[in-house]
Amino acid sequence: MDRVIIFDTTLRDGEQAPGATLNIEEKLEIARQLEKLGVDVIEAGFPVASQGDFEAVRLIAEEVKGSAICALAHADADAIDRAWEAIKKAKQPRIHVFLSSSDIHLTYQLRKGKAEMLALACEMVARAKGHVEDVEFSPMDATRTSPEFIYQIAEAVIDAGATTVNIPDTVGYTTPEEFGRLITGIFEHVPNIHKAVISVHCHDDLGLAVANSLTALASGARQVECTVNGIGERAGNASMEEIVMALSTRKDFFNLTTNIDTTRIYKISRLVSELTGFSIPPNKAIVGANAFRHESGIHQDGVIKERTTYEIMDARTIGLSSSTLVMGKHSGRHALKTRLEELGYSLSGEDLDRAFSAFKELADKKKEVTNRDLESLVAEGLRTTSEAYHLEQVQVSCGDKSVPTASVKLIAPDGTVLADAALGTGPVDAVYQAINRLVRVPNTLTEFSVTSITEGIDAIGEVTIRIESEGSVYTGRGAATDIIVASAKAYMNALNRLLAAKGKE
Ligand code: KIV
Ligand code: ZN
C-alpha cells in the first residue's frame, strides 16, 4: 500500500479565514496536537506576513519535532530568507514557495509573462534550496493554468531543486474528473517527475475540495494539503478529517494509508473550533454532532441489532470517548489530570492548577462535568493566557420593568483595577457598553451566538462573537454557566485579540 503525506495548513491557510486569528499560545497548542495526531508536515505560517506569524513559526519549529515544519514564502528573496530564519531550528524544516501561473493572475496581478514567471520560480526555488533540502513549489491558480504550462513549470522547478510540486486549486474551480486528468497528465508529461512528490491543495468554493483531493490521490498524487474542519480562505480548504477517514474507511477502494492516529481527530476538531470560534455544523461529516446519531426508528432498530447496518465508521475510531467515569465535585486533581490525558491534554504545573480550580468552580455549580465541559475549560484557559485586559468581575441588573445596568471591573495591562458602569438595551449590551468605557477601542459587533455545550439546565453556555474594526474581523469566545458572564468573557477575548493584532502592526 502507498502512503499519503498529510500536509496540514490549519495554521496558515486555515488561519486566513476571516476572524480565525489565533494567538501564539493557541497556535503552539494546535501544532502540538497536530504532531500527536501524526501529520507529516505542519505548515505553521507565512513568516514574512507579520512579526506575530514569524514568532509563531519560530516557536513551533523549536518545539515540535515529530512533524516537518513548513514556512510559506511568496517568490521573493526576502520572504524566503525570512521563512528560513523562522524554521532553521526545526528538525525537519521545509520552505514552501508559491508564484501565480494562470493567465488571469499573470496579466492582472503580477503583470508578468510566462517566461518571466518560470525564470523567477526557478530562481526562488534555488534560493530556498540554498537554505534547506526540503523545498516545495506551488504554481498558484494551477487549475486555471494551461496543463502544458504546468508540465513545463513542474519540470523546471524540479530541476531547480523542488522536492514537492504542489498543484493548488486556489479558487476551488476544478472538478474531480478534470483534476484527476491534470495529475495523470503531470505523470505522463514531466520527465523528471520521479524526483518529486506531487501534492494537491484544494479549496471548497464549489464544495468539491475533498472529492478533488481524493481523485488526485487516486491518480497518483502522494501529498494532500488540508485543514482541520476544512477552515480556510472563503469556503475553506479540503477537510483533513474527511480525507483521512475516506482513505481509511474505503481502504478497499483507494489502497492508500496515512500516518494519522484517527482516534485524535475528534479532539483536534473541537480544539480548532474552540480556538478559532468557528462552530462545527451538526451535519458536518465525521465530526458534526449528528454524524453518529440515528433519529429514524428503522435506523435505530438496525443499529441496535448490528451497528454496521447504518454506520460505515465506528465512532471510537475518531476518538469519541467511551469513558463512563463521572467527574464531579468529589473528583481530585489526579482524576482530572488522568481524564484530561484521555482527552489528549497533558497539563502539569500552573496549567493544571488553573484547570483544576476552574473545574472545582464548575463542579460546584454542575452535578456532572462532562468531557465537553472539560474541553471547554481547557480552551478557556488557553484563551486567557495572553490577554491584555482581564475581566475581574461583572454584575448586571435587569428585568422587564427596569433599565438594564451593568458594572464591570477589569485588570489593565499595568495591573491597575479599572471599574465602570453603563446602561444598555439589554444586559449584554449594558456589559459591552461598560467594557467600552474602559477599553476604548472603536469596533462593531457583527455576530453574537449562544450555544449550550451539553444538555441540561446547568449546562455551560458558550458565547461566540465577532467584532469588526478597521476592516478586520476578530472572534471572541467565552464559556460559563451564566451566559452574561460568558458574553462578557467573549467580548474581552475578542478585544484582547484586536489589541494584540494592533500591537503587532
Ligand atoms: O490556495 C493556494 O493557492 C495557496 C497557495 C499558497 C498554495 O494557498
Ligand atoms: Zn490555499
Image: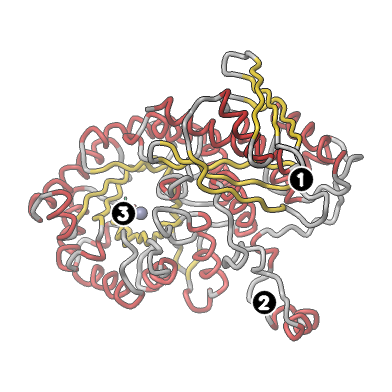
Which one is nearer the viewer's eye here, 217 or 230?
A: 230
- 226 displayed left or right of 361: left
Q: Secondary structure at mark 2?
A: loop
Residue visible at 36% across and 32% down in the picture: 50
Which one is nearer the viewer's eye here, 342 or 277?
A: 277
State the image coordinates of residue 305 (x, y, percent, origin top left): 80, 83
Label 3 to label 2, Cα distance in Å?
37 Å
Observer-side mark, 3 or 2, equals: 2
Per the rendering, the mark at residue 311 is 2
Per the rendering, the mark at residue 400 is 1
Quadrant in the picture for residue 201:
bottom left
In the picture of the structure, the residue carrying the numbered disc 3 is 164
Residue visible at 52% across and 64% down in the picture: 244
Which one is nearer the viewer's eye here, 169 or 439?
A: 439
Kind of residue indicated by mark 2: Glu
131, above or below 290, in the image = above
Report the residue that reaches farthest toward the front: 401
